Amino acid sequence: MTEGRASRSTEAFFGRRRGKPVRPQQAAALVEGLKRHGLDLGQPAPADVRGLFEADVSAVRLEIGFGGGEHLLNEATGHPAAGFIGVEPFVNSMAKMMAAQAQARLANLRVYDDDATRLLDWLPDASLDGIDLFYPDPWPKKKHWKRRFVSPVNLDRFHRVLKPGGLFRFASDIESYVNWTLLHCGAHGGFEWLAADAGDWRTPYRGWPGTRYEAKALREGRTPAYLTFRRR
């Protein structure tokens, strides 16, 4: 990590880290899971991040804020030749994921339980094939919009760690955040929105399993948008 990267602020995480008490079985899975699958940013990042995984993988993708883990587990299970890094600072969600991983025993999964910006600054240039950001905290009040994860500085981070042609995928049911993301990616200049018509952003991604957040949005009458950007 360069001095410049180390000194940059980690402004992206503002939420609480804990909810209800973690059940003993999940607490044990959390400790053991982080010991085995957690990334140690105190060590230098490998030049080739494919070496982070127990499995022999040909590509590496990152999911920021995996929440209930429905998508991350589905992708890691369905694509064993790819490596997946999941970031989630909320303890209850990470405990649930580590309990699921104890059963699934996926050799292509690593996790990080802190601020995603620290991981992004740790990763080497052009090391990722894709970044997924699904249903992030929308910070609906205008005075809090500066807390949204999609920002000029984080798009710079995405652009640095994504390979040319790598994909940034964003899903949300909050119209103002969808528009915000389109405007920021357009203004950045390093990302091309891959949409030929409205059907492209209204249609879930191939193999999309749905998430609990999406189910809640649909129950409450909000329409999700699925955006895909290619790193120039």
Image (cartoon, helix red, strand yellow):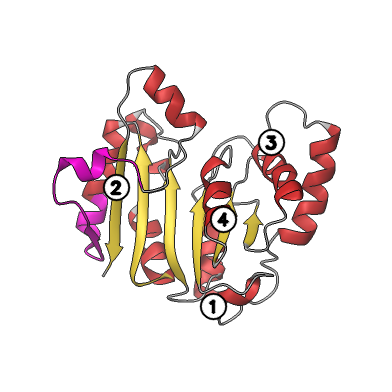
Between the C-alphas of marks 1 and 4, the distance is 31 Å
Extreme bottom residue here? Answer: 47
Quadrant, the N terminus:
bottom right
Q: Which residue is mark 1?
A: 2
| x 50%, y 53%: residue | 63
Q: At which x and y percent is residue 87?
A: 58, 52
Between the C-alphas of marks 1 and 2, the distance is 32 Å
Name the image quarter holding residue 174: top left
| x 75%, y 54%: residue | 34
204 within the magenta span: yes
Q: Which residue is mark 2?
A: 227
Give the residue type at disc 3. Asn
User: Front-most of 143 and 99?
Assistant: 99
Between the C-alphas of marks 4 and 3, the distance is 20 Å
Tell me the magenta residue range. 184-205
Mark 2 Cα-neighbour bin, 10 Å: few <14, some 14–19, many ≥20: many
| Label located before the other in sequence (4 or 2) | 4
Mark 1 Cα-neighbour bin, 10 Å: few <14, some 14–19, many ≥20: few
Q: Which residue is mark 4?
A: 76
For residue 33, side relative to residue 153 (left or right)? right
| x 77%, y 46%: residue | 30
Q: Which residue is mark 3?
A: 92
The answer to whether residue 169 is seen in the rendering is: yes
Between the C-alphas of marks 3 and 1, the distance is 32 Å
